[in-house]
């Protein structure tokens, strides 16, 4: 029983850790990664902006 619970938690954790879509440079992004991750890994978003831009 304990093994099944641990296996289920591992499966759920692996699903959340799946890679997200890569956003090309110049496209809109969010610094929290909710729209995906920039190819370069850099999303420039100022505090007063709702979206940033991948660099």
Image: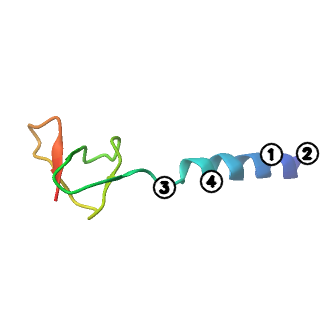
Q: Farthest residue toward the top? A: 50
Looking at marks 2 and 3 on the same chain, the residue that comes earlier in the sequence is marked by 2
Residue 51 vs 37, above or below: the answer is above
Q: Residues within 10 Å of mark 3 (few under 14, many from 20)?
A: few
Residue 28 falls in which quadrant of the image?
top left
Query: Which quarter of the rendered picture does the C terminus lie within?
Result: bottom left
Position of residue 29 measured from the top left corner of the image (x, y, whole percent): 24, 45
Looking at marks 3 and 4 on the same chain, the residue that comes earlier in the sequence is marked by 4
**Marks 4 and 1, how far apart at CA:** 14 Å
Residues under numbered marks 2 and 4 in contact, where contact means CB atoms less than 8 Å apart: no
Residues under numbered marks 3 and 1 in contact, where contact means CB atoms less than 8 Å apart: no
**Marks 3 and 4, how far apart at CA:** 10 Å
Position of residue 17 measured from the top left corner of the image (x, y, whole percent): 54, 54
Q: Residue sitting at 20 percent across and 48 percent down? A: 27
Q: Residue sitting at 33 percent across and 47 percent down? A: 33
Mark 2 vs mark 4: give the one in front: 4
Q: Name the residue under label 1.
A: 5
Q: Nearer the viewer, residue 23 or 5?
A: 23
Looking at marks 2 and 4 on the same chain, the residue that comes earlier in the sequence is marked by 2
Residues under numbered marks 3 and 4 in contact, where contact means CB atoms less than 8 Å apart: no
Position of residue 22 measured from the top left corner of the image (x, y, whole percent): 36, 54
Position of residue 54 measured from the top left corner of the image (x, y, whole percent): 19, 54
Q: How crowded is mark 2: few (under 14 residues within 10 Å), some or many (20 or more)?
A: few
Looking at marks 3 and 1 on the same chain, the residue that comes earlier in the sequence is marked by 1
Q: How many marks?
A: 4
Q: Name the residue under label 2.
A: 1
Q: How crowded is mark 1: few (under 14 residues within 10 Å), some or many (20 or more)?
A: few
Q: Mark 3 points at which residue?
A: 19
**What label does residue 14 carry, if any?**
4
Query: Which quarter of the rendered picture does the N terminus lie within?
Result: top right
């Amino acid at each position: 029983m304990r093994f099944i619970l641990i296996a289920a938690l591992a499966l759920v954790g692996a699903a959340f850790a799946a890679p997200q879509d890569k956003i090309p440079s110049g496209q809109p992004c969010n610094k929290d990664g909710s729209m995906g991750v920039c190819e370069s890994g850099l999303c420039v978003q100022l505090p007063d902006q709702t979206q940033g831009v991948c660099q």
